[in-house]
Amino acid sequence: MTARALINVPPKAKRGEIIGIKSLISHEMETGFRPDATGQPIPRNIIKEFVCTYNGVEVFRAEFFPAMSANPFVSFTTVANESGTITMTWTGDNGFFATESVAITVE
Amino acid sequence: MIAWMPVWRIVAAAAIVCATYPAIAEIPMSERKSGYEFMGPDSRAMQDEDTANPGMLSVLDGEALWKRKAGAAGKSCADCHSDARTSMKGVAARYPAFSPAVNRPVNLEQRINMCRTDRQQAKPFPYESKDLLSLATFVGRQSRGQPISVADDENTRPFIDNGRAAFTRRQGQLNLSCAQCHDDNWSGRLAGSPITQAQPTGYPIYRLEWQSVGSLQRRLRNCLTGLRAESPALGAPQLVDLELYLMWRARGMPMETPAVRP
């Protein structure tokens, strides 16, 4: 099943305003350090990178590690310059890829 | 779990000290508090905002399942119940509810599985499976803010009484009752954690310790394990009775599903 993401970006902002961006994505973030019922290590399965672009320009990037919680939540700010699209992508182990886009109107 | 055991060892010692204290009665209605009120500001903020609450991911999964056709009947939940926002509003607040089919109360997960088998003619979902939890969380979400109102009548009363007996009976190697912590010492702490009143207002919850959504029965089994008492299997009648008693004890309190808990 594809990952589910919850995104919180204000739909409207004033030019130059600092806006908060929050994202939550469903992912087990399996550390690779846990054994299964038979004692074999469960292979690592984590998101490795999160990138946010604003009209194609990168505004935020984060590297994720095994110690992060399941369903990682990321919150950061950027400056609202122009109307357009804010896009978030998550990439990780086993070819994991998810992307979400939201529109923002800047007045 | 790793951090849990030493804590319970402290409890064992404390239990011996307080063993002679008289038990206090049930918590007065006006003093009842949800687990939410014992949480720090970060966990509260997580529960308060739908886009920060990981339990909402389960709600979305449940909504997708609600609309998916399944079983030999080829019907979705929505085919019979249409819009859950109206058809399921307040339903979770009434569960566990008496079912004439089995002549005893069933919890919400069991009620959903009855529709799975009888109406959809599909295999029931296993307890604590992602699909069952998602549907229960989605149905539970439709009762958020609704007052808890399980039936208290001649059908349910014997089972409420069973649950109360289980809640007040000492058990396990620690020889403690649920009530000794959750009625008599709810304002205290067990090492770092607030004990709380064991109010069932937010289930299924997203528990940070679990890193996932889980049912009330899973939470009850955690406390039973902590007492080093025998844990009935998921879905066992004893656990449903305990759920029913907890919901009766929380009557009138608003539902919070999906709540966040530490």
Image (tube, rainbow, N blue to C red):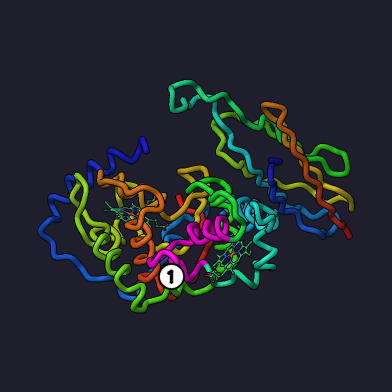
On the image, the x and y values in percent for residue B13 come to 17, 45
Observer-nearest of A14 and B145: B145
Q: Amino acid at mark 1?
A: Pro
On the image, the x and y values in percent for residue B130 come to 56, 46
Magenta stretch, residue numbers:
B92-118
Q: Which residue in the rendered view is the most extreme toward the top?
A: A40
Left or right of residue B248, residue B168 in this image: left
Q: Chain of mark 1?
A: B
Observer-nearest of B123 and B176: B123
For residue B225: magenta?
no
Instruction: Write the residue at 30% across / 64% down.
Output: B163
Quadrant where the N terminus of chain B sits is top left
Question: Residue B197, can we see it?
Answer: no
Q: Which residue in the rendered view is the most extreme toward the left?
A: B20
Observer-nearest of A63 and A35: A35
Quarter of the rendering containing residue B157 = bottom left
Quarter of the rendering containing residue B135 = bottom right
On the image, the x and y values in percent for residue A65 come to 60, 29
Q: Secondary structure at mark 1?
A: loop
Q: Which residue in the rendered view is the most extreme toward the bottom?
A: B153
Instruction: Write the residue at 32% across / 69% down.
Output: B160
- Neighbour tally class for label 1: few under 14, some 14-19, many 20 plus, Cα within 10 Å: few
Left or right of residue A7, residue B151 in this image: left
Left or right of residue B158, residue B101 in this image: right
On the image, the x and y values in percent for residue A73 come to 63, 44
Q: Vertical placement of B117 versus B80: above or below?
A: above
Question: Residue A85, can we see it?
Answer: yes
Residue at mark 1: B100
Left or right of residue B32, residue A94 in this image: right
For residue B98: magenta?
yes
Instruction: Write the residue at 53% across / 50% down.
Output: B124
